[in-house]
Image (cartoon, coloured by chain):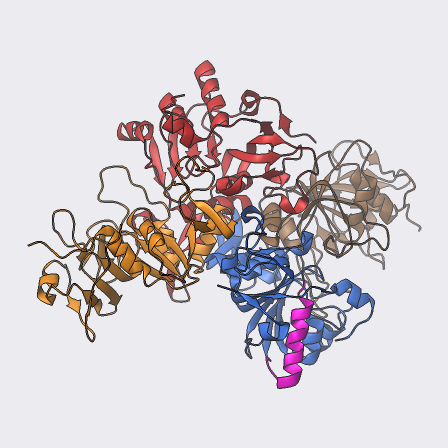
Chain colours: A orange, B brown, C blue, D red
Amino acid sequence: MTLPKLTNAQIAWRAAQDIADGAYVNLGIGLPELCARFQPEGRRAMFHTENGILGFGPAPEAGQEDWDVINAGKKAVTLSPGAAIFHHADSFAMVRGGHLDMAILGAFQVAATGDLANWRLGASGVPAVGGAMDLVNGVKQVVVLTDHVTKDGKPKLVDTCTYPLTGVGCVTRVYTSLAVIDIDPRGFVLREKPAGMSLDELQAVTGAPLHTDGPVADLTAPKVD
Amino acid sequence: MTLPKLTNAQIAWRAAQDIADGAYVNLGIGLPELCARFQPEGRRAMFHTENGILGFGPAPEAGQEDWDVINAGKKAVTLSPGAAIFHHADSFAMVRGGHLDMAILGAFQVAATGDLANWRLGASGVPAVGGAMDLVNGVKQVVVLTDHVTKDGKPKLVDTCTYPLTGVGCVTRVYTSLAVIDIDPRGFVLREKPAGMSLDELQAVTGAPLHTDGPVADLTAPKVD
Amino acid sequence: MDKTCPTLADAVAGIEDGASVMIGGFGGSGAPIELLHALVDRFRATGSPKNLTIVNNNAGNGGIGIAAMIAAGMVRKVICSFPRTSQPHAFNEKYASGELELELVPQGTLAERIRAGGAGIPAFYTPTGYGTDLAAGKPVAEFDGKHYIQERWLKADVALVKAEHGDAYGNLTYRLAARNFNPLMCMAAMHSIAQVTRIVPLGEIAPQDVITPGIFVNTVVEMPTPRQEETRVRDQEVY
Amino acid sequence: MDKTCPTLADAVAGIEDGASVMIGGFGGSGAPIELLHALVDRFRATGSPKNLTIVNNNAGNGGIGIAAMIAAGMVRKVICSFPRTSQPHAFNEKYASGELELELVPQGTLAERIRAGGAGIPAFYTPTGYGTDLAAGKPVAEFDGKHYIQERWLKADVALVKAEHGDAYGNLTYRLAARNFNPLMCMAAMHSIAQVTRIVPLGEIAPQDVITPGIFVNTVVEMPTPRQEETRVRDQEVY
């Protein structure tokens, strides 16, 4: 079966539609970073990066990089008017102190309890955590962007995470290639799915029960990249 | 008996002779503030004030005050070249974190154990603590400047403080109107006393035993004000 | 996103009865006197906000600012390090009569508790106050052979601060040592209101010169001619 | 009082075997590459300092800076949040062979532990890491119905940082987001050494523009032409 999946850019586009004007937002490395491209017209979020910039703008032209203006992924960004620079303790005061409205992160697994695993696949290899554990415990709303399944087709939305946890009960919304899902005390609550996919088909690639709560909308996104 | 007492300015002068060049020093409100006037030639200490200035200079001319450049006693000071301004948490990071070399404070009582009482005379009245408790627990060396006795002739250097404590075992040196005294595990160790006063006479106005440890020097100070 | 507000009265209109209010400044330096007077005006006109808990290093001087709030009867409790001032009569009278509660906190602990509130640190250990009356009832712990007491974060519903420049995003700078408690209080309050001498266009404050990033500020109101507390007290001004 | 030092080699001459060394920067931004290379030179010439514990957000990239120190065999342990980089081979090889110990710390906890070390706060509570493998063995406490773990301060013998301007008293400014961990590390080390692009006369840094007050700095050395890590790694430079 070929699933009617959104591309990564489309997942980011869909998530970006829910970022409010003026929201303070931290975008994780990789897929979440793409959200910055797709802000709806008339809205401007204030993007935060752990290394001490609030209100940074898009990447500079190649060759115009200033390597003292970078994001958490060590990519060059730019300073928009009204940006602020601060040290790491102040940066994580913003994070831990509940001042950021939203953290948009990637995931290896998300559990129906809101548990998140996104920092380590197992006991081997070199572990690296960065700011993920701070973000999931401090930011007001933690949302995850991810493919709905792993490369070999296994569910990434699960009953219980089998990989080491990043945080306990922290995720409240997931945007996947196949669904928009809220997490509340019942577990996964389906909000959107592709029009061409039945609830049973979606449930078959999801590792924990999908609840519904009123009508499920169609998951759509324009062609973007 | 008229005691051969140093004046307040002379006590401050005597203490100032022991402030090293380049030392970072916090001067308490009142008598300790006078030390800044008496720095030996060729030395320059860096004075710290709790409200967020390091390296302030003398008071401005009357009428030239800038009320955003004040010390902990809310008196106007000036900014010397090389001064720095910072917020209160950073200011007390300097204090609590052991970055200041010396705090020079006043006292109601100092005990032979190094306990200090200087913030409250008893249960009545309005209590006020300011930064005293932070200073005595954070600064590398805490010294006290005080008259040797109270206005009605009672010892201020005592066996056990009867007033509420500011800090436990924190004072290591006391400059009084009649003596220079170190505090070590033995208790008060007399270093200097007026030439015209016997050890017995000094002991009679001191509330705990005065030990000696080698010769006791003469306590002298020029006429200053 | 525009955090600017046209008037001092509008800026303080949302403060509710019983609110905890952090007030910046050390003595008069950095004290948002005009915001406080707008609050006194509102109280006189409407009876609100009352029963306030205020957090400041001091507890008002003379007849203006915090002293005017206390004298007006808006304040139930003061959390501060040093209520003694050159003219402390407003505080002293209400304190002596039992109308005003006092929580005395060492100055560095006060600053650190406020920072902790802003930084999401619910508790920390400090040597400050160990073995004294101000440690009464607080947990004690030993680290590396030395004793420390546990202190809790301090947060507030509102912060009122005085800054020099501010922009529409809420970025602030402070004049010289008027910085003091102000940046910390902006971090620790649910709603931070800054009176600024000048509202400047976005970008006029260079990113590296911002002292309080706008994320910590909700409302910016211009007060181009603030009069310093020290001058007002010298002039025996009573608000 | 003059904290300036004539050469990079002199600046790092006092660092001892077994020392803990905080190294500023995030990736290449704010990384004191030239000071690190002076330290590598000294190790190659004398065999010292060795068995270092280094504290940084990362663990070296390519063949320069921290990666060169690790490859040279000077480093026994790394305390960091994110050892993965674009070219992590120096770390990965020594880590895989067991020659290098790793203490992994969440980035915000790392920053806060360093600040706590500088601020005299021996321990604090944070929600970060609660319920995860990185909380193993740490005390847990509940405040207001939420769980937190206790973290200890982090101090070091030496800090090596990169600043933009510095003066004889040790006051520092940083270039844009090169600030990152540098001011915190200056606070937390017994001896802080700053390479600065320019040593400026006292007073040229206005008091309100000082980012790191000189009390936190012991040695200032001018390095007028620092080359950024990103450029060196792109050029495949190996020190």
Residue B106 is situated, as x and y percent measured from the top left of the image, at 75, 52
Answer whether residue B84 is visible to the viewer in this image. no
Check the image and report above or below for D127 versus C51. above
Of residues D225 and C89, the one drawn nearer to the viewer in this rendering: D225
At 48% from the left and 63% from the top, the residue drawn is C1
Look at the image and tell me in which quarter the C terminus of chain C lies: bottom right
Q: Position of residue D205 (x, y in %)?
A: 66, 40
The segment highlighted magenta reads: C31-50
Q: Check the image and report above or below for C167 versus B104.
A: below
Left or right: A176 in relation to A202: right
Q: Is residue A196 visible to the viewer in this orientation of the structure?
A: yes
Residue D88 versus residue A60 in the image, above or below: above
Q: Quadrant of residue C212?
A: bottom right
- What percent of the width, then of the height, locates residue D153? 47, 45
Magenta segment's dominant SS is: helix
> Is C222 positioned to the left or the right of A151 in the image?
right
Q: Is residue C48 magenta?
A: yes
Residue at far left of view: A1
Of B178 and C12, the residue lying toward us:
C12
